[in-house]
Image: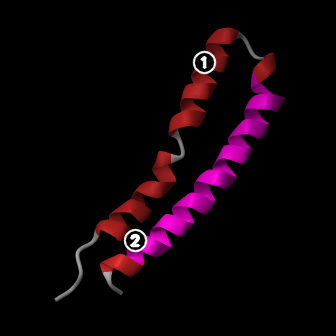
């Protein structure tokens, strides 16, 4: 599979994942985090804002692999 096709597939998967994750994070933030104390809210928003990177790192590495000769 060529790099262009990997990047296209990876971009589509990434967009779907980020949209789904954003909806999930908003539901969590709206439902449970609003009742927590302010320091815990801050920590939760930081974690929710950064945790999406972890599952996407293998996808980014796969997209960046050079083509086989």
Q: x, y (%) of residue 47?
A: 56, 32
Label 1, label 2: how many angstroms apart (C-alpha)? 34 Å
Q: How is the image coloured?
A: secondary structure
Q: Earlier in the sequence, mark 1 or mark 2?
A: 2
Query: How many marks overall?
Result: 2
SS of the residue at dot 1?
helix
Q: Residues within 10 Å of mark 2 (few under 14, many from 20)?
A: some
Where residue 37 sits in the image (x, y, percent)?
72, 11
Q: Position of residue 50 (x, y in %)?
A: 50, 37
Bounds of the magenta span?
6-33
Q: Quadrant of the N terminus?
A: bottom left
Q: Is residue 30 magenta?
A: yes
| Callouts 1 and 2 close, C-beta under 8 Å | no
The vertical placement of 31 against 41, above or below, is below
- Find the residue positioned furthest to the top: 38
Residue name at image x 81 percent, y 17 percent: 35
Q: Which residue is mark 2?
A: 7
Q: Residues within 10 Å of mark 1 (few under 14, many from 20)?
A: few
Label 1 sits on residue: 42
Relative to residue 47, is residue 51 depicted above or below?
A: below
Mark 2 lies on a secondary structure that is helix
- Quarter occupied by residue 40: top right
| Image location (x, y in percent) of residue 68 | 21, 85
| 57 up-or-down from 49: above or below | below
User: Quick check: 28 left or right of 49?
Assistant: right
Look at the magenta stretch and give its main secondary structure. Answer: helix
Residue at the image point whose x is 74% and y is 31% from the top: 29
Q: Is residue 45 magenta?
A: no
């Amino acid at each position: 599979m060529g790099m262009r096709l990997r990047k296209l597939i990876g971009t589509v998967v990434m967009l779907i994942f980020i949209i789904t994750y954003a909806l999930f994070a908003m539901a969590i933030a709206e439902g449970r985090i609003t009742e927590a104390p302010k320091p815990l809210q801050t920590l939760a928003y930081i974690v929710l804002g950064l945790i999406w990177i972890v599952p996407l790192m293998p996808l980014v590495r796969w997209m960046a692999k050079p083509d086989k000769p």
